[in-house]
Amino acid sequence: MKLLVCIKQVPDMESRFRPNSQGIWFDENDLAWRMNEYDEYAVEQAVQLREQVGDSAELTVLSIGPDRVVEAIKKSLAMGCDRAVHIRDDHAATKDPWQIASIIAAYAKGQGFDLIFTGMQSQDRGSAQVGVTLAEELGYACATTLVGFAYGDGTVTAKRELEGGIKGVVKLATPALVTCQLGLNVPRYPTLPNIMKAKKKEIEVIAVADLLTEQPLTATTSFHPPARKGGGVVLEGDVGVLVEQLVGILKDKTAVLR
Amino acid sequence: MFLELTEEQKLIQDTARVFARAELEPVAATLDQSDDRTPMLANLKRLAELGFMGLNVRDTYGGAEAGVIAFSVAMTEIARACASTAVTVSVNNMACEVIQAIGSEEQKRAYIPKICSGEFAAASFALTETCAGSDPSGMVTTATDDGDAWVLNGSKIFITSAPYAGVFVVWAVTNKEAPKGKGISCFLVEGGTSGLLVGKEERKMGQHASATNELVFDNCRIPKSALMGKLNDGFRTAVAELAGGRIGIGSLGLGVGLAAMDHATRYVTERSQFGQKISSFQAIQWKIADSYTELEAARLLLMNAAFRKEQGKPFSKEASMAKMFATEAANRACYQALQMLGGYGYTRDFPLERYARDVRVTSIYEGTNEIQRVIIAREILRNFA
C-alpha cells in the first residue's frame, strides 16, 4: 500500500506579521516556522495507518518550499514517515493553490498512491483548495474535514465535521484523498532517538521547474492588516444600569447569552 | 563560524518547548506548593519515553545520541516551564553520561537503559557531605573491602531525587592513608539496597518538587562489581565528569531567566500607569535591554561550552564560565522581572516569585559560582605560569 502525506511549513501563528515590500504577502524575515497544524493531524493519521498496515505499506511525506521546509519534513520522518520528497521552490509562497495542487499532481501521477492525506487548509493562506484540487486532478475520491478515520479492505470510513457540531460518515474506495481537521487525533511528539534516526531516511529533492507546467489562476494583490477601528464601546453610569446594558449587548451581538 | 542549530537540534528544542508548555507549565505552580510529586513523576516518565534522559548517550544504551548542544537547548526549554523537572532531567542525563564514561560494559547495560527509558524515575549523585561541600575530597564516608562485598558507612547530604532514584553514583573513601583526593572511589548503589537509608528531606527555598535528601549508609553491603572505574581514582572522575553538569545547570538557569523576562515583558506592554503603558518608561526599557542582553550572552557561552564538549575539546573552563555567568544573569533577570511587576511580582498569583526562588540555587549547586571562579582562574593562570 502506497501512502502520501502532503505538508506545508507555515510561520508560527504567534508571529508578528508584516506585509512584504510588494505588499502582496507577509515578510518572511525573522519568522519562526513550524508544520501547519492540520498537516500534523494528516501526518499522525497517515503514520497510524502505516502502523496498522505494517511493512507492506510505504509512507511518503511531500513538501514544497525552500530549504527551510526540510525541518518540517524531518519532523514527519521522525514521527514515522518512511521517506520524503522535497520539491524545492524558493517562491512557493507566490504560487496559487491551483499551481501547488498541479505540482503535487505532476509528482503523484503514475506513482500509484492508494491514499493521500493533506491538512484541511494551511494556517497562513487558508484557501483549503489544494487537497480537493489534487484529488480532482488525479481522479481520486475525496472527503474533506475529517474528524474520524478508519480503513479496511480498500475502503476509507471518514467521519466529517458539518456545521453546528453535526457529524457525517462517508465511505470512499481507494484511491482516495482525505483532508484532516482538528479533533481527528492527537499528533505524537517525535521522540529524540527517532529525530536522530530520521537523518538516515531518504529525502528525494526535485526542482519545482521539473514539475510546474501550470499558470496561476488567481493572484493575491494585497496583504494588509485591517484598518484600525475606533476604540470599543465604553459603558458609563450606575452599576445596575451597566449590567443591564452589558447583558443586552451580549444577547444582541454575541452567542454568549441567548 | 555557524551560529545556527541543526535541523535535528531545532526539532529537539521544539519538541521540548511544546511538551514543556503543554505538560509541565500547567502543573509547575501546583508542584511548587504541594507535597504531592505524582504529576512530576508522571511527566518525568513521559520525558524519558521521548528520549530526554539520555540526550548525549549512545543508542546502544537507549540514548538519543543527540549531543551536548541538544542537551543544553532542551534543558533551557524544560526549565522555562518547571525548574524542578529540569534539574531532575539534568541530573539523570549526567548520571547516564558518567556511567557511560567510566562504567564497565556490564554496568552500562545494567543501568543506563533503565534511566533512559524511565524505568528508574531518576538517578542520583551522592558526593556532598556535611563537612565536604565545595571541598569533596574531605569526605569521610567509607567503603571497606569485606572479601565478597564493599561495605559503605557514612552519610551524604543534598542528594537530588533520593526518594525515587533507582541508582546512586556514590563516592566513598577506600584508602584513608592516601593523600587527599587520592583514596576515593566511585560506586553504583541501587535504590532499596539494605543499609541504604533515605533520610530527611530538606525544606528548601525553591525547586520544591525536586526532592533533596540526606542519605545514610549503615553497613550497606554492595557487591564487588559495584565499584565503578578504577579503585582510588573516583575523585578525579568526579571533577572531570561533573563539568558536563555545569552546562546543564547553566542552561536551566537560562531557561528560568528567560521565562521570568518573557512574562515581565508581556506584562509591561499591558500595564498602564500615568496614562501610558509602563513599557514606554526608560527605567523599564533598560531592565529589558540589560536582562535580555545578559541572557543572550549566557546562551552564547553555553553554546560554546556545549559545542566544545561535543567536539571532544577541553571544555572545563568554558563550562564553568557559562555556568557562572548564566546562573548569575538568570538571578539578576528574575529579580528585575519581579520588580517590573511591582507588588504583583511578590504575590503567588504570578509566577515571578517562584522563578526568583527557583533560580536562586543555580548559582550554588553543581559547584558554587565561587568554585567556578576558582576553576576559571586556575585554567587561565596555567597559561601564564
Image (cartoon, coloured by chain):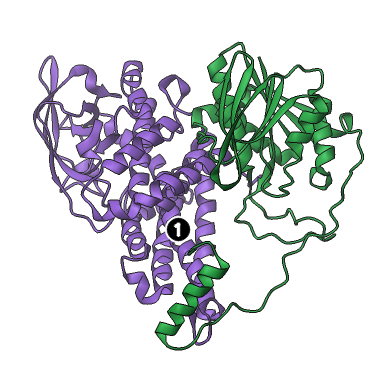
Chain colours: A green, B purple
Judging from the image, what secondary structure is the residue with disc 1 in? helix
Residue drawn at the location 83% of the way across and 47% of the way down: A94
Residue A204, above or below B201: above
Residue drawn at the location 22% of the way across and 55% of the way down: B204
| Quarter of the figure that contains the N terminus of chain A | top right
Provide the residue designation for mark 1: B259
The answer to whether any part of residue A201 appears in the image is yes
Residue B370, above or below B90: below
Residue A183, above or below A247: above
Task: Point out residue A2 in the picture as x, y percentages from the top left corner.
Answer: 68, 17
Choose top left, top right, bottom left or bottom right for residue B145: top left
Choose top left, top right, bottom left or bottom right for residue A114: top right
Left or right side of A51 for A88: right
- The outermost residue toward the front is A258
Q: Specify the amino acid type for callout 1.
A: Ala
Left or right side of A14 for A250: left
Badge 1 local density, few (<14 within 10 Å), some, or many (20+)? many
**Chain to which mark 1 belongs:** B
In this rendered view, identify the residue nearer to me: B82 or A110.
A110
